[in-house]
Amino acid sequence: MADISIQFHALPKEIMPVFRSFVENAGAHVVSINFHPFQAVEVAPSTLGAVFEDPSVRRLAVTLQSPILPVRGMNEFLDNNPGALLLEVGRRSAEGLNESWLTARAEDAGTLTEWRNFAKLLRAMTRAGAVAVNPETGETGELKNHRFSPGAQALEREGVPMLPAAGTSRLRFKG
């Protein structure tokens, strides 16, 4: 079983066209996932612009076959749709820009090849290299593999905090 895991900062409007193009070329299915309350709904690729703009959508799942829905929660979704590609969409808020995260675990070689193709596209639109800074102590730690888009880098240069998925550190991008 192989894993894909890419943590990055990007504006949803930067990710959306690459994501839509990938989904359309792969003939994949997209599920919009909201929390509190949990809701998983298949969406058409033509509606992805609105989906990426909707702050209530926290995650998108991609499957190569029709997704098995309805489900009551994320664990049930993953049990019913093994090998799904997940994209956690980092949103901008008053606190800063939240981290995005692309993850997948697939046993099927064809599925894994498709997910790796999207990972390549994501890597091509981002650069690697960040430093995590503890705002209380000033201590730093290098994040060589953390990626960022031009839009996220522009916001960070303007002073918008880059927020990690968890914890209180703030990220600074190299380059």
Image (tube, grey):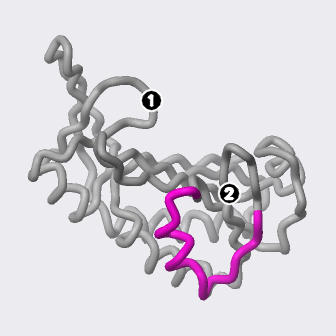
* Residue marked by disc 1: 166
Assess disc 1: are there few (<14), some (14-19) or many (≥20) residues with their C-alpha within 10 Å of its C-alpha.
few
Q: Residue furthest top?
A: 137
Magenta span has 11? no
Tell whether 1 sits left or right of 48.
Answer: right
Residue 128 x/y as whole percent: 27, 50
Measure the C-alpha gap from mark 2 to mark 1: 20 Å
Residue 90 x/y as whole percent: 43, 52
Q: Amino acid at mark 1?
A: Ala
Relative to 126, say whether 9 is above or below.
above
Q: Nearer the viewer, residue 134 or 83?
A: 134
Tell whether 116 sits left or right of 146.
Answer: right
- Residue under the image location 89 percent in, 63 percent down: 68
Determine whether the residue tagged by mark 1 lies in a helix, strand or loop. Answer: loop
- Residue under the image location 43 percent in, 46 percent down: 7
Tell whether 64 sits left or right of 8.
Answer: right
- Would you identify the image quadrant in which residue 51 lies? bottom right
Residue 91 x/y as whole percent: 41, 53
- Residue under the image location 73 percent in, 63 percent down: 109
Determine whether the residue tagged by mark 2 lies in a helix, strand or loop. Answer: strand
Q: Amino acid at mark 2?
A: Ile
* Residue marked by disc 2: 33
Magenta span has 47? yes
Residues in magenta? 41-56
Assess disc 2: are there few (<14), some (14-19) or many (≥20) residues with their C-alpha within 10 Å of its C-alpha.
many
Which label sits on residue 65?
none
Which numbered mark, 2 or 1, is in the foreground of this view?
2
Q: Nearer the viewer, residue 119 or 109?
A: 119
